[in-house]
Amino acid sequence: MEVSLDQVKKLREKTSAGILDCKKALAESGGDLDAAVEYLRKKGISKASKLVARKAGEGLVHSYIHPGGRIGVLIEVNCETDFVARTDEFKMLVNDVALQVAGNPPYAVNREDLDKDLIEKEKEVYRSQAIEAGRPEKVLDKIIEGKLEKFYEDSCLMEQPFVKDPDRKIGDLVKEFSGKVGENVVIRRFARFQLGETA
Amino acid sequence: MEVSLDQVKKLREKTSAGILDCKKALAESGGDLDAAVEYLRKKGISKASKLVARKAGEGLVHSYIHPGGRIGVLIEVNCETDFVARTDEFKMLVNDVALQVAGNPPYAVNREDLDKDLIEKEKEVYRSQAIEAGRPEKVLDKIIEGKLEKFYEDSCLMEQPFVKDPDRKIGDLVKEFSGKVGENVVIRRFARFQLGETA
């Protein structure tokens, strides 16, 4: 089977194996990258474990621990250059986002990251509540739509109103900064632990 | 159907709804707690969202950011009393664990937390490697067992040798401290972000 150069490149980055070994592994695995890694490991050619990480951007990993140590946040915000990552403005942005997550726990960074099932369940709940409240059938969709938008605003970091300036969303902050420095700026991920919370 | 008091208690903690509403919701939901929460929300009785968290222990949420902001760790370590959580010894333990996670990324806290499929895959890889190396069939199980123990030592936080004192495992540190203060001490969870890493 034909193996693309791009696949070979990816496999080499993952395993540090030679080009020919990578080509063979991909051919034997039908082009499946994970299977090819597995193949190389079985052959003893690659020592790559699943812990191997690959760099894909600049930026900062930053944390905020609320006084008392009962709430903590870890975030990663990416930009394109180390130069921007080192500026005080970027550090301030990252810190503001961490504070935001501590104070207003989101489910996800973007609404696209939300679990589809979760959204369907929310809609079902809104529908039942509206019916229970005696709202007419023809306005149900509109009510659900409105409540869903509110839900996104509560639960998606990028859509939350910024705690320090509620007229702007977190997404606006990011966009403004991105425009100012002329680089893509992306809130990559966050973790938020609250002491003793159960899933 | 019969509804246990324990279930009612749990549902009340989650939803702050009345006892009778909780009993009804549980009966209607066949005793399924999540379904009962859903039921109460649909009836408009509970406003509880999935963001509601319940306290289940004392301890500390703590972070370590490696200089340069390219690696960050967030951890939660639980103990039984706020008194112990505030001691310098506990803080030191928590900090040591955070440093450990930064330096030696684990998959999981305990070997029981590891994904079963991951372990099966590891075993398969070890078997193939051993066969490839010409090891006789009758010693394969022993070889796999040994490699698996090594894998646990690398990938499970509690089994990792402590970076500052490799003769002791992280689990030993926790046990020693627990014995000294006479409280259960548990590393609850961790998050580790490395700048730009891809899953």
Image (tube, coloured by chain):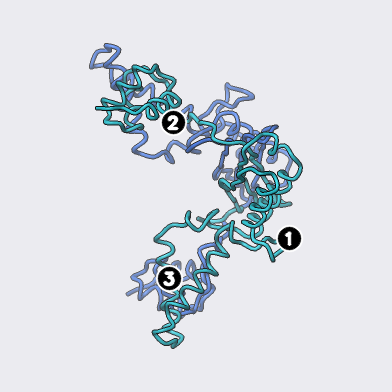
Chain colours: A cyan, B blue
Could you tell me if residue B77 is visible in this image? no
Which of the 4 image quarters holds residue A3?
Answer: top left
Could you tell me if residue A179 is visible in this image? yes
Would residue B88 appear left or right of B183 to someone viewing this image? right
Q: Secondary structure at mark 3?
A: helix
Along the polypeptide, which appears first: circle 1 or circle 3? 3
Identify which residue is drawn at 47% across, 57% down: A114
Q: Quadrant of the N terminus of chain B?
A: bottom left
* Residue labelled with disc 2: A50
Where residue B92 appears, as percent x and y from the top left, is 69, 36
Look at the picture and state if A190 lies above or below B68. below
Q: Chain of mark 3?
A: A
Report the amino acid beneath label 2.
Lys
Report the amino acid beneath label 3.
Lys
* Residue labelled with disc 1: A164
* Residue labelled with disc 3: A123
> In whole angstroms, how far apart are the C-alphas of marks 1 and 2?
40 Å
